[in-house]
Amino acid sequence: MKLIFIGPPGSGKGTQAKRLASRFGIPHISTGDMLREAVAEGTPLGQQADAIMKSGALVPDDIMIGMIRERLARPDAGKGFILDGFPRTLVQAEKLDALISGNGSEPMRVVRLLVPDEAIVKRIALRRTCAQCGAIYHLENQPPKVDGVCDRCGGELIARPDDTEGAVRKRLESFHRQTAPVADYYKSKSWLKEVDGTGPVDQVFEKIEKSLS
Ligand code: AP5
């Protein structure tokens, strides 16, 4: 299984990718999580990415392609993977194709989550993320058992620094301008499945599973 999730910010890519990864026993590779880790560790990449992410803009393609090339070369990705947040531009999509076909691999499956912009703004405003393990919550739809504390690891739940109104608007704009054409690119290869990402998380998960079967 080589699966790519495409969708606007807050459409549920991370939520659904984590579930599918544990169902199939393959790694969930989130470029957003990898960048946030680099920021937290204060690496040179993290220092460069921090301001870009907070503004809602995209990190340059060459950095992202190098990052994904290294990650896919790790042994755990050999049996499959779920990509969340990559590719986000046509340049990234073409490079990914070259990387995968270089491995002599099969075509990928691509799921696009469809969620209207108004719903996204509400989801992101109430999202909380575990600072320790990255688990995703929503104060209304998926609340933690104890306020502010991660059910899984006991870590602190925080609002992401790029979830400000201005940054979300910019991320949505960049999705429509730069990432929606990536979905069209996969549609032209007949790899794309479009899934309605509205409704409860379990129902969306069922719809994704059905689209993949
Ligand atoms: P990234 O971390 O990838 O952010 P994003 O694409 O904006 O997506 P999000 O993580 O915000 O949302 P999601 O779709 O995963 O939704 P979630 O499951 O959390 O990237 C961050 C930044 O890094 C980018 O802006 C860019 O700067 C940089 N970057 C990353 N990759 C890059 C690349 N390839 N190239 C260049 N730059 C890159 O769900 C959201 C909320 O909704 C949660 O609270 C959740 O509980 C709730 N929810 C989920 N599903 C449902 C449902 N069905 N019903 C109700 N609520 C739901």
Image (spheres, helix red, strand yellow):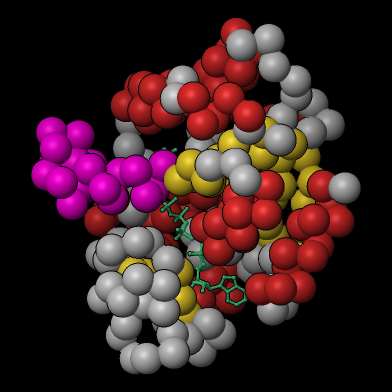
Q: Is residue 144 above or below residue 129?
A: below
**Point 30% across, 85% down: residue:** 148
Q: Nearer the viewer, residue 89 or 73?
A: 73
Q: Quadrant of residue 135?
A: bottom left
The span shown in magenta is: 31-52
Asked if residue 20 lies left or right of residue 29, the reply is right
- The majority secondary structure of the magenta stretch comes to helix
Residue 113 visible in the displayed image: yes
Residue 182 visible in the displayed image: no
Number of disc labels: 0
Q: Nearer the viewer, residue 24 or 211?
A: 24
Asked if residue 147 lies left or right of residue 78, the reply is left
Q: Is residue 60 above or below residue 149?
A: above
Q: Is residue 23 magenta?
A: no
**Point 18% across, 52% down: residue:** 40
Q: Is residue 156 above or below residue 181?
A: below
**Point 61% across, 18% down: residue:** 100
Q: Is residue 36 magenta?
A: yes
Q: Nearer the viewer, residue 140 or 17?
A: 17
Asked if residue 205 lies left or right of residue 103, the reply is right
Where is residue 44 shown, x and y percent of the image?
A: 13, 33
Where is residue 82 shown, x and y percent of the image?
A: 59, 42
Where is residue 73 shown, x and y percent of the image?
A: 46, 20
Asked if residue 118 lies left or right of residue 143, the reply is right
Where is residue 38 shown, x and y percent of the image?
A: 23, 43
Q: Quadrant of residue 195?
A: bottom right
Q: Quadrant where the N terminus lies?
A: top right
**Point 28% across, 63% down: residue:** 132
